């Protein structure tokens, strides 16, 4: 098998599937997909975080083998997405005083960012530091370079994850004998391809409903303003349906085929329906199924709205959700 470096490979560790994709950029910067592969993650990933390193490594090895078979080339290294339940943002402020009026330089700004990045957080590690604004005098500046002042206050957003999240990923890839070229924060990359430049500038919230987690992101003026991964997802709906004495495989099928996030009361009352499932042809009414589904969806959406409110930008999202 030949060795080639003219393509990029990324792997994302999702709650239900581990996915690998290989792509190649043309001269115009457009990305062409060359190969795709995935493996079930239910036995090794929980809420977006590795909990079984051996099985994760096995899934990674299988994905790499499939990609290499399609590409007819060996893969030297891959980029890996980080997400999961513990990923969220926290605010940080770094203040610097000068003895006399000083012109702000890129070096000073870089020092503020480095100081913020070195902040110690008990039980968490900083994945990325996102500059917000800089307070110079009484005004806020997106770019303070060139401004003369005796005082500057850098306001930053830390994207953090619980300590051990990255280490478990690294151990899994080491066991799979696959080199990591670098990390990317999966929600941020999703935002780049989901929202337009105008939406990110005007202000928007991006919600990703997953199997075991729901990711909430808020953007304004092209900047990430808030990020949190909630430990609630569509699998919760499946488990709620199981509470009716229904096997999980049947509950999942009922959810996918018939469940609705919201149903007008008159729709059920005017035309009641009974659904059949399982080998013994058991039944469940659409009223019961949709009441279960709607209750859990209401809980998830209530939590999403709460996070948008916590961002402080709930009344500034001109582009909506």
Image (cartoon, rainbow, N blue to C red):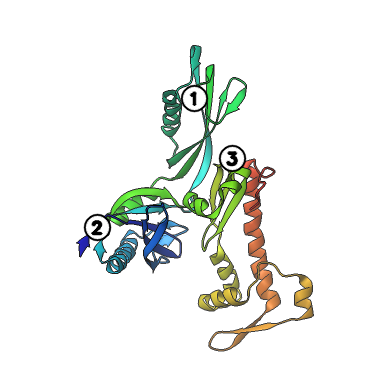
Q: At which x and y percent is residue 143?
A: 52, 29
**Quadrant of the image occupied by residue 74:** bottom left
Q: Residues within 10 Å of mark 3 (few under 14, many from 20)?
A: some
Q: Residues within 10 Å of mark 1 (few under 14, many from 20)?
A: some
> Mark 3 to mark 1: distance in Å?
18 Å
Q: At which x and y percent is residue 165?
A: 40, 50
Position of 164 relative to 260 (above/below): above
Position of 310 relative to 179 (above/below): above
> Mark 2 to mark 1: distance in Å?
42 Å
Q: At which x and y percent is residue 111?
A: 42, 26
Q: What element carries label 3?
A: loop
Q: How many labels does the image show?
A: 3
Q: Quick one: label 3 or label 1, which is nearer the N terminus?
A: 1
Q: Which mark is residue 8?
A: none
Could you tell me which residue is drawn at 79 percent across and 73 percent down? 266
Contact between labelled residues 1 and 3, with CB atoms less than 8 Å apart? no
Could you tell me which residue is drawn at 61 percent across and 50 percent down? 205
Q: How crowded is mark 2: few (under 14 residues within 10 Å), some or many (20 or more)?
A: few
Q: What element carries label 1?
A: loop
- Seen in the image, is 24 located left or right of residue 311? left
The residue nearer to you, when weighing 137 against 263, is 137
Q: Residue 221 carries which label?
A: 3
Q: Quick one: label 2 or label 1, which is nearer the N terminus?
A: 2
Could you tell me which residue is drawn at 28 percent across and 66 percent down? 65
Q: Quick one: label 2 or label 3, which is nearer the N terminus?
A: 2
> Mark 2 to mark 3: distance in Å?
39 Å
Q: At which x and y percent is residue 250?
A: 54, 79
Q: Which mark is residue 4?
A: 2
Quadrant where the N terminus sits is: bottom left
Q: Which mark is residue 145?
A: 1
């Amino acid at each position: 098998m030949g060795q080639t470096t003219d393509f990029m490979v990324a792997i994302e560790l999702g709650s239900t599937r581990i996915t690998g994709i290989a792509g190649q950029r043309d001269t115009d910067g457009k990305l062409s997909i060359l190969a795709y592969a995935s493996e079930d993650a239910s036995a090794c990933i929980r809420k977006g975080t590795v909990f079984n390193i051996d099985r994760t490594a096995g899934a990674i090895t299988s994905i790499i083998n499939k990609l290499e078979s399609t590409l007819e080339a060996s893969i030297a290294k891959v980029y890996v997405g980080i997400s999961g339940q513990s990923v969220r943002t926290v605010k940080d402020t770094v203040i610097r005083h000068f003895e006399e009026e000083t012109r702000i330089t890129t070096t000073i700004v870089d020092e503020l960012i480095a100081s913020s990045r070195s902040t110690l957080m008990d039980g968490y590690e900083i994945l990325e530091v996102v500059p917000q604004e800089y307070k110079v005098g009484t005004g806020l500046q997106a770019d303070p370079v060139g401004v003369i002042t005796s005082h500057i206050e850098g306001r930053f957003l830390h994207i953090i994850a619980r300590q051990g999240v990255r280490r478990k990923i690294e151990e899994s890839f080491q066991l799979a004998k696959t080199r990591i070229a670098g990390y990317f924060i999966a929600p941020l990359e999703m935002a780049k391809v989901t929202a337009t430049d105008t939406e990110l500038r005007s202000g928007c919230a991006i919600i990703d409903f997953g199997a075991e987690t729901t990711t909430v992101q808020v953007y304004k003026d092209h900047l990430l303003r808030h990020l949190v991964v909630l430990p609630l997802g569509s699998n919760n709906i499946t488990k709620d349906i199981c509470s009716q004495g229904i096997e999980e495989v049947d509950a999942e099928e009922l959810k996918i085929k018939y469940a609705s996030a919201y149903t007008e009361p008159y729709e059920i009352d005017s035309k009641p329906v009974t659904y059949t499932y399982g080998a013994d042809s058991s039944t469940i009414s659409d009223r019961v199924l949709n009441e279960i589904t709607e209750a859990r969806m209401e809980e998830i959406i209530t939590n999403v709205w709460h996070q948008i409110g916590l961002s402080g930008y709930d009344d500034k999202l001109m582009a909506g959700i």
